[in-house]
Image (spheres, rainbow, N blue to C red):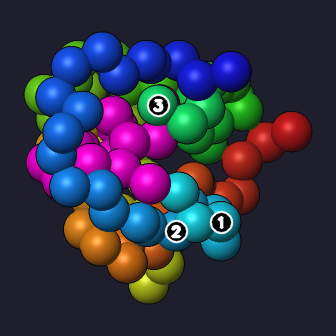
Amino acid sequence: MPLLKRVAETDRPALTFMLDGAPVTALAGDTLLTAVLTHGERLRRSEFSGAPRAGFCMMGACQDCWMQLEDGTRVRACSTFVREGMRVRTQTGVPS
C-alpha cells in the first residue's frame, strides 16, 4: 500500500520513469521521494540495517533518502525532480 496519497495538483502532466526496472508514473514537478512513495510504502532499505526508509528531513540534510540512478550516480530523492525516462533503483547491497 502506498505511503502517500495524492490529494491536490492532479492536473499536472504525467511522466513515466523506471523504478527497479518497472515503469511507474509521476507528475511533472514531483520529486523522486514523492513519486516513489505514491507507489509504495518505502523509499529504500537502509544499507546498514536493512530497515525500511522513507525520508526524514525532506530538505536534503539527513542522508536518509539516497537512491541510485541506473548509472550508479547517487541522488537525494527529496531534492531530485523526476524526468521522463529516468531510470532509478533502490540501493543495492542491503542486509537482509
- Residue 50 x %, y %: 72, 32
- Please name the residue shown 35% across and 22% down the image: 6
Q: CA distance from mark 3 to mark 2?
A: 14 Å
Badge 2 is on which residue?
18
The C terminus sits in image quarter: top right
Residue 63 against residue 1 in the figure, above or below: below
Circles 3 and 2, Cβ within 8 Å, touching? The answer is: no
Magenta region: 25-37
The N terminus sits in image quarter: top right
Residue 93 against residue 1 in the figure, above or below: below
Pick the residue in front: 25 or 48: 25
Q: Amino acid at mark 2?
A: Met
Q: Secondary structure at mark 3?
A: loop
Q: Earlier in the sequence, mark 3 or mark 1?
A: 1
Q: CA distance from mark 1 to mark 2?
A: 5 Å
Is 57 left or right of 26, judged from the image as shown?
left
Is 57 left or right of 93, judged from the image as shown?
left
Circles 1 and 2, Cβ within 8 Å, touching? The answer is: yes
Pick the residue in front: 84 or 58: 84
- Please name the residue shown 30% across and 15% down the image: 7
Q: CA distance from mark 3 to mark 1?
A: 15 Å
User: Is residue 18 at all visible to an observer of this figure?
Assistant: yes
Q: Amino acid at mark 3?
A: Thr
- Residue 86 x %, y %: 36, 73
Badge 3 is on which residue?
38
- Mark 3, Cα crowd under 10 Å, few <14 / some 14-19 / many 20+, is some
Residue 30 belongs to magenta span: yes
Badge 1 is on which residue?
22
